[in-house]
Image: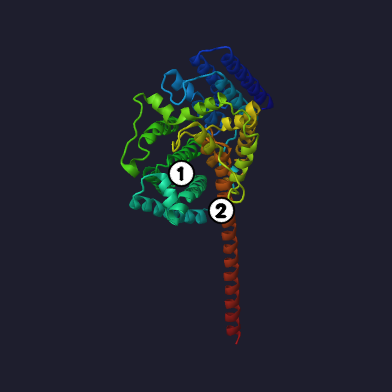
Amino acid sequence: MERSIGLKYVTLLMAICLSSVGIYFTDSVLMNIIYFCVLPIIAVVLVRGDLAHPYTWYSIVYTLYAIGYPVTYLFESTYDIYIYTKSLMLVQIIALSIILVIVGPTRISFHKNVFKLAFEKRNKTLFYVVLILVSMSVLEVIFKGYSHKVQIYEQGSPIVQIGFRVILLLMIIYAINQTITFIKNEKFNNKELFAFILITFGIFYYSGERDLFLRGLIVILFLYYIFSAKQKINLLTIIMGISSLLLIPLMAKFKYFGLTGNVSKSDGNFLLSLFNSEFASASKNLQIILLSEYNSYFGGQSYIWGIIRGLNLDSIFTAPSIMSWYNSTFFEENRAGQGFSILAEGYLNNGYSGIVFIAVSIGLIMKLLYRTSKINVYFFVYYLSAIPIFMYSLRADLANLLTPLIGQNLLFLVLLLIFNSLSREFKIITKRKNKSKQVIVLEKVGKCGES
């Protein structure tokens, strides 16, 4: 086993060298893209295409974001910036290499006996309670006639404010319930599956929040792959994965259709539409920063801001958004949707060493969550719910990684654990009281019989 892992590390290091050296010694954009893709392909092969392993899901998504801008530049379909430097691909391949080396190629097989079952009835009841709350918020959005999602958050009633925040709680409860249901019955609960898809699609359609719908689809895909497909790539897994990718440009086109009835214009080329609608932003933003004079501009300050926001302490301590700073500094006023790059945040703080710091941090967090995911249902769902967060954070900042990981998902899981523990204690106490009452009644009946 140790020898096998050692050989995999050697293969990984060879792939890192090939990709890095190939990019360094070639000036062709196309060849830079090809050499870059060598490393993620080898990484996927090393874990036999196990979708549950970060080598597969993270490498694939990271690569799409990394080559997004170079692809659009190659086809002369970029905007805002028309310059490409191979330093962009070099820093991205180095960052990915660091993450892969830290995470390691060791695989986890998720089996029935790995998980300790939680209290299913309590979570199922809570699922429908939260579902009703989220449904009420969607209904208000439908009938109030909002025209933009910013307006929803600023002018929405307390029900909307709460409903749009507890959707993540609903996602966690859904994943826990479906995991437990499959472990017990070897099948999923189709009613909960349908309700979950319907409500997350409703939020996207009537608010433009496509991130929540995509997160839900990713959770559904991974639950199916791990349990129904038994961690083997089959035809349905491939169809679900490809369909999720195809939905990205389609959702960008119909993002505000439910709010305004308008459809966004898109490029006639599907490949370019896919990259321009989502994947070009992170590498484009990183290229802009690498060409700017803002090397080490923040000196590590934004890391502290990210931790403050991740712990939900930004109401007490000042914690500006580096993503907002970037958009206001480099783009016209009131122009939204440009995203950012978590690697660019590292560069803005400490130059190239900052990029290394970000990569090491991501690698350590990812490794911890993956390795602990086999402990029980809660650790498993925490890792599962973190997958779309790691994906999205590539085009965001450190705060957008830590806030949902700590301030939302971890908080919700801790609250669920407390809720389930209290429910169990209440059940035990109730049973004891009932037994005591039965004993008292029996004693009284016995005394009456004696008299």
- Viewer-nearest of labels 2 and 1? 2
Hey, what amino acid is under mark 1?
Lys
Q: Position of residue 450 (x, y in %)?
A: 61, 85
Q: Mark 1 — residue?
A: 187
Q: How many marks?
A: 2
Q: Position of residue 323 (x, y in %)?
A: 53, 37
Q: Residue furthest left?
A: 261
Asked whether residue 276 appears in the rendered view, the answer is yes
Nearest the camera: 31 or 235? Answer: 31
Neighbor class of circle 1 (other Cα within 10 Å; few <14, some 14-19, many 20+) is some
Q: Mark 2 — residue?
A: 416
Q: Please give the label number shown on residue 434.
A: none
Element class at badge 1: loop
Image point 53% across, 25% down: which residue? 287
Element class at badge 2: helix
Nearest the camera: 235 or 299? Answer: 299
Q: Residue furthest bottom?
A: 451
Q: Position of residue 289 (x, y in %)?
A: 55, 27
* Residue 421 found in image quarter: bottom right
Image point 57% across, 40% down: which residue? 399
Hey, what amino acid is under mark 2?
Leu
Instruction: Pick the quarter of the image with the N terminus.
Output: top right
**Do the residues under discs 2 and 1 have CB atoms within 8 angstroms?**
no
> On screen, 383 above or below 17?
below
Q: Is residue 236 left or right of residue 47?
A: left
